[in-house]
Image: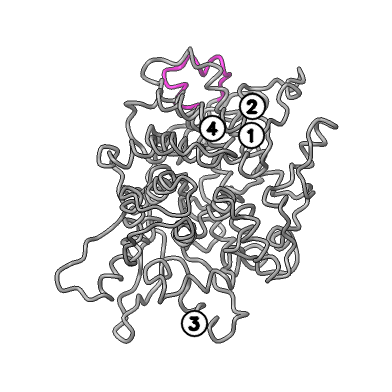
Amino acid sequence: MKNILKNSIVCFSLMTLLISCEAELDLSNPTALSLEELLQTDDGFIALSNGVLDAYQKVPANEFYLTELRSDNSRANSENGNFPLISSYNVDPNNGDVATYYSNNMHTIKHANTIIDNRFLAPESQQYTVGEAYFMRALCHFNLVRAYQNVPFVDKVLDVTEGEAVDYPQLPEAEVYEKIINDFKTSIAYLDGATQNRYRPSKGAAICLAAKAYLSQPNPNYIEAELLLASVVENNTAFNYSLMYTDRGAGQTDAEYNYNLVLDFGHVFGNQFNGQLSDTDGTPDGSWANSSGLEINNEIIFSIQYDLVSSDNYATSDSGLDDQVETDSESHSFSMTLQGPSNGVNIATNELLTVLTPELQPVRFYTTLNPLEYGAYLADNTVDVFNTKYPTDGEIGDNDWIVLRYADVLLLYAEAILAGADSTTDTRAINAFNQVRLRAGLEEVANLTKEDLLAERRLEFVYENQRLYDLIRFGEADNVLSEFSTANSLNYTSGKKYLPFPQREMDNLPNFYDQNDGY
């Protein structure tokens, strides 16, 4: 991965809060400063903002356990342990991943609030860091409200010695969304004119995520979402956003054209294909490997950066407070292999394998699944088929985590125009939808249905932690997951579309938080 900055780590003591510079860190000679001293340095707010991004590196480490693994896309291999309980909708309020995902988002919020609380001290040249802080605070609360539903919205650094946490009760879902959208909109103003860096929050990312929040709230505001998304889609060249897509060359066969599309789609995730087009059956023959030179491209709008650092301090969801800013490598890709935790998670379900086939998905199939395992699965449906979007299979990896990409924006735009209806022929929605279809090697449509849009999102974003929240947003979670649960002898109920509120948080403030339905 390309480094944003290479500086020495800057730490300060504030409720044991550790702040560092982003990306590659030099920890051999750290400089300890108080918050007051740090804010007086020339680059103090930049260091603080880098610390927010460093803190967020822990969030994707177990997010897929609690999102994709609770959808009809994925399952866990082992019949014992934590992950099959999550996959079967038997997760407990005491579950460690439920607790750490909540606390990691809240810890990042605390970093962001440090900047926001002191925003009037930021020099003119570093005002963008205030926008980054508002963006990250909004993003973390967006994560939390979608996962746990009714959550506190924390808008300042809390002094635990003063018991300030009791001033922040769980809020109704709609009220949380209102505050999230306000934060994203505030960040837009601060980030206007800031230099684009796809490893940092940007004006374009804030516009698009504000729109996604409008679509995700209990009563979607399609009009506001459409206006925001139109400002990006209709001006995508100004934002420097586009799909990774190669036009068909003269004389290319279907197999040659689809092969180039496979390479394009893999490059979105920073993956290089080591192989060639098979002479025997005209399909890609080879394997994927992460390539840092491909990870920043015009489809990426906002991504969380990881570097391949040979260290025991790779980023996990439960990295300690004393070492979390030292962890640049990621561990989530290892979990998705046979050698990973409990022999793998995010393994394709039978349901996914009926729609994600080489015949139906000639591009996405070869960038998402292992063809050899799929071939064995066809002969024996007990064979595990692992995903290949994150191909690093060791305990330390450098696959970046994509928070937002342009394909998502195009399909969200179509969703906003559809506005909850069963279908539309609006040319703007059709054009946005078909751009994604064409890159996937599929035929264009003239009429867009809600069912088609949901299905397209499933296949485009499989293993990107989108499916569960798409089902909830489209109002289809109970229908789809109940059927999936029955077919696989799982334990889904309507309340379990959300996670339990962490018992650890409830124990910290007895009789203060309410537990979610179903737990």
**Residue at the spot of label 2:** 154
**Residue at the spot of label 4:** 138
* Real-space CA distance between mark 4 and mark 1, rounded to the nearest whole angstrom: 11 Å
The percent coordinates of residue 417 (x first, y second) are 40, 45
**Residue at the spot of label 3:** 375
Pick the front one: 320 or 152: 152
| In-image side of 507 versus 428 (left or right) | right
Pick the front one: 63 or 310: 63
**Identity, as a three-letter code, of the amino acid under mark 3:** Gly
Circles 2 and 1: CB atoms closer than 8 Å:
yes
Residue 27 position (above or below residue 429): above
* Real-space CA distance between mark 2 and mark 1, rounded to the nearest whole angstrom: 8 Å
Pick the front one: 467 or 510: 467
Q: How many marks?
A: 4
Circles 3 and 1: CB atoms closer than 8 Å:
no
Chain-order first, disc 3 or disc 1: 1
Chain-order first, disc 4 or disc 3: 4
Magenta stretch in the rendered image: 32-48
Q: What element carries label 1?
A: helix
Crowdedness near tag 3: few (<14), some (14–19) or many (≥20) residues, C-alpha within 10 Å:
few
Q: Is mark 2 on a helix, strand or loop?
A: loop
